[in-house]
Image (tube, rainbow, N blue to C red):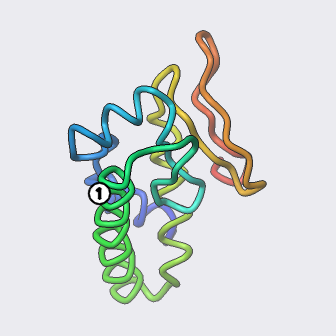
Amino acid sequence: MKRLLLLALLAAIPAAAQTPAVDTARVAGAVGERYDGYLGVAAPVSAVVRSQIASINIQRRSLYSRLAASKGVSPQDVGVTAGCQLLGRMAVGEAYMWADGKWRRRAPGQAAPIPDYCR
C-alpha cells in the first residue's frame, strides 16, 4: 500500500533531466537514470554537466527525504521507488543502471528496462 502511494506521489518527478546540457548528454547515453532514483554519469562528460547532475540529485534527495518523512519510510525506499518509475520512462538509446552497477543502453525494440523488484 505504501509503495502504491509513493508511486502516485513520485509521478511528478520529470523524466527529462531539466537542463539542456544534461538532456543532450542523456540523449547521447553519457548520462542516465540509476536504480536508486538518481542521475548518474555513464560516460565522460564536462564539469558543467557533472555540476548540473549534482544539483538535480540534491533536489531529488530533498524530495525523497520529504516524502519519506511524511510516509514513514526511508529516503532510500523512496529513491528506489522513484528509480523504478524513472527506468520505466527510458527512451531508446538512453543509459540506465540497475543495482548491479553496470551501465546499459535501451536498444530499439527493447521493452522498458524495469528490474524484477519493481513489479
Q: In this view, does 16 lie to the left or right of 81?
A: left
Extreme-right residue of the structure: 100
SS category of the residue bearing label 1 = helix
Residue 117, image x, y percentages: 71, 54
* Residue at (73% x, 54% y) in the render: 101
* Residue at (30% x, 45% y) in the render: 17
* Residue at (55% x, 73% y) in the render: 77
Q: Nearer the viewer, residue 54 or 107?
A: 54
* Residue at (61% x, 10% y) in the render: 109
Q: Which of 92 and 4 is in front in this view?
A: 92
Residue behind mark 1: 52
Residue 42, image x, y percentages: 57, 44
Residue 25, image x, y percentages: 39, 35
Q: In this view, does 97 lie to the left or right of 32?
A: right
The number of numbered discs placed on residues in the rendered structure image is: 1
Q: Which amino acid does label 1 sit on?
A: Gln
Tell me: residue 11, above or below residue 59.
above
Extreme-top residue of the structure: 109
Residue 39, image x, y percentages: 45, 54
Q: In which quarter of the image is residue 112?
A: top right
**Label 1 Cα neighbours within 10 Å, binned few <14 / some 14-19 / many ≥20:** some
Q: Nearer the viewer, residue 4 or 36?
A: 36
Q: Which of 22 and 69 is in front in this view?
A: 22
Q: In this view, does 72 lie to the left or right of 117?
A: left
